Image: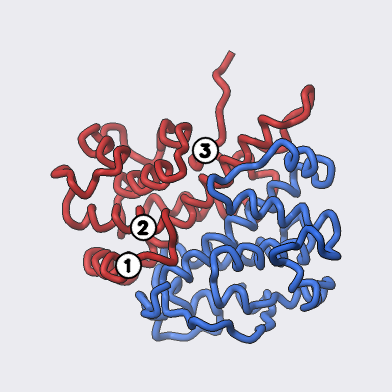
Chain colours: A red, B blue
C-alpha cells in the first residue's frame, strides 16, 4: 500500500482542483513562481522552508520540492535555514541573506517589515524583484495555511466517509 | 506598517487597478493574478456575499486599509448591505448573520490563525453545511484575498487612517 500523502504547500492543487477554474488559475500562478528571473528556485525553496519553520510545520519541512533540482540545496545551505541561523552562515551571499531575512520578517508580520530590510532586497533584486518576492511569499504562506487546514479536515472527517478535501 | 511605498506603480496606466498597482511591475505574474481575481469572483462555487465576507474578515485581520475600504458591487447586489458588512467584526458570532455566513467567517479565522488549523467541531459543522467543492472554493478565495492583501501591506505606503467605503465593480479588476 502506498504511504499516505499529506497535503503540503507543494501538492494541494490536486485537492483544490474541486474548485474548478479559480483553483486552476492559482495552480498556474504557483507554477510561474518557480520560473522567473528574480529569485532562483533554490533560494525560493529556502524561503518556503523559512515560512514552514515559522509555522512549526514538520510535514512541510520534510516535503520534497519538485521545482528544485536534485542537489541544488546541500545541507550546508539547508540546515542553517532550518535552524534560523542563515544570517550567520558563510554559505549565503549578502543578497541571499537579505532575501531570507525579508522572508523571516514577512512570516512574522508583514506589517512590521523594517524599511532597511526591504531596502536591502530592493537594492539586490530591483523593484520588480522585491514585488515578486512579496507575491511569492504570500502564495507560499497561504498554501502552507491551506495545507494545514486540509490535513485537519481529513483527520476529522467522519469515519467511513472520504475527507471533503485533502 | 511602513508609511513609505517600497515600489512605485507602473508609469503606464491601463485602467485595471491590479495592473496599475505595483503588481504591474512583474510581467511574469500579473496576468495570472488578474485572471485569478476574475475567476474567484466569476466562477467560485459559493455566493458573492460569502466571498465578500471572508475577504473583509481577511482585510480586517491583515489590516489592509485599502482592502477594508473596498466593497465589490457584485456582493452588494447579492444582498451584502453595509449594515451586514459591519457585522463581520468582533462578536460576529452573536450577530444576525446566518449560520452559513458565520461558518464561512470561522473558516477564514481558522485559515488566518496561528497556527492555522481547523478544530474537530468546525470540521464537522463545515461538512454539514458545505460541499467538498465549496470548501475547496473557499480556500482558493481565501488564499487569493490573503496573499494580495499581504502584498499590499508589505509594499507599504498605505494611509494610517481608514478610507471611505469604495464600491468596486468586479469587472474593473479583470481583463
Q: CA distance from mark 1 to mark 3?
A: 29 Å
Q: Are marks 3 and 2 in contact (CB under 8 Å)?
A: no
Q: Are marks 3 and 2 on the same chain?
A: yes
In the depicted view, which residue is nearer to us: A23 or A165? Answer: A165
In the image, which is nearer the foreground, mark 1 or mark 3?
1
On the image, the x and y values in percent for residue A13 come to: 58, 43
Q: Which residue is mark 3?
A: A8
**Upstream in sequence: badge 1 or badge 2:** 2
In the depicted view, which residue is nearer to us: B47 or B90? Answer: B90
Question: Is A53 displayed left or right of B74 in the figure?
Answer: left
Q: CA distance from mark 1 to mark 2?
A: 8 Å
> If the image is split into quadrants, where does the C terminus of chain B sit?
bottom right
Residue at point 37%, 52% (across, down):
A35
On the image, the x and y values in percent for residue A67 come to: 39, 41
On the image, the x and y values in percent for residue B169 come to: 69, 79
On the image, the x and y values in percent for residue B143 come to: 58, 55
> If the image is split into quadrants, where does the N terminus of chain B sit?
bottom left
Q: Are marks 1 and 2 in contact (CB under 8 Å)?
A: yes
Query: On residue A105, which mark appears?
Result: 2
Q: Are marks 1 and 2 on the same chain?
A: yes
Amino acid at each position: 500500500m502506498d504511504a499516505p500523502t499529506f497535503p503540503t504547500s507543494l501538492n494541494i492543487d490536486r485537492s483544490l482542483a474541486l474548485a474548478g477554474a479559480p483553483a486552476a488559475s492559482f495552480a498556474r500562478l504557483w507554477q510561474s513562481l518557480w520560473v522567473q528571473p528574480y529569485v532562483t528556485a533554490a533560494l525560493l525553496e529556502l524561503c518556503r522552508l523559512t515560512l514552514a519553520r515559522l509555522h512549526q510545520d514538520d510535514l512541510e519541512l520534510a516535503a520534497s520540492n519538485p521545482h528544485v533540482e536534485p542537489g541544488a540545496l546541500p545541507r550546508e545551505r539547508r540546515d542553517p535555514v532550518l535552524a534560523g541561523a542563515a544570517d550567520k552562515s558563510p554559505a549565503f551571499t549578502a543578497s541571499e541573506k537579505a532575501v531570507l531575512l525579508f522572508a523571516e520578517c514577512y512570516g512574522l508580520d508583514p506589517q512590521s517589515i523594517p524599511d532597511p530590510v526591504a531596502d536591502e532586497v530592493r537594492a539586490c533584486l530591483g523593484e520588480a524583484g522585491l514585488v515578486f518576492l512579496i507575491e511569492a511569499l504570500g502564495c507560499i504562506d497561504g498554501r502552507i495555511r491551506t495545507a494545514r487546514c486540509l490535513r485537519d479536515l481529513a483527520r476529522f472527517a467522519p469515519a467511513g466517509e472520504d475527507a471533503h478535501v485533502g | 506598517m511602513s508609511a513609505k511605498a517600497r515600489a512605485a506603480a507602473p508609469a503606464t496606466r491601463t485602467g485595471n487597478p491590479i495592473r496599475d498597482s505595483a503588481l504591474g511591475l512583474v510581467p511574469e505574474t500579473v496576468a495570472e493574478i488578474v485572471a485569478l481575481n476574475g475567476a474567484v469572483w466569476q466562477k467560485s462555487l459559493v455566493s458573492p456575499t460569502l466571498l465578500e465576507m471572508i475577504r473583509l474578515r481577511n482585510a480586517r485581520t491583515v489590516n489592509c486599509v485599502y482592502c477594508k475600504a473596498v466593497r465589490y458591487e457584485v456582493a452588494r447586489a447579492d444582498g451584502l448591505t453595509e449594515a451586514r458588512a459591519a457585522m463581520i467584526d468582533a462578536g460576529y458570532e452573536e450577530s444576525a448573520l446566518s449560520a452559513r455566513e458565520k461558518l464561512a467567517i470561522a473558516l477564514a479565522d481558522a485559515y488566518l490563525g496561528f497556527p492555522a488549523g481547523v478544530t474537530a467541531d468546525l470540521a464537522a459543522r463545515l461538512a454539514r453545511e458545505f460541499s467538498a467543492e465549496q470548501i475547496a472554493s473557499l480556500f482558493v478565495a481565501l488564499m487569493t484575498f490573503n496573499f494580495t492583501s499581504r502584498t499590499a501591506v508589505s509594499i507599504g505606503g498605505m494611509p494610517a487612517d481608514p478610507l471611505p467605503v469604495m464600491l468596486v465593480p468586479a469587472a474593473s479588476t479583470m481583463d
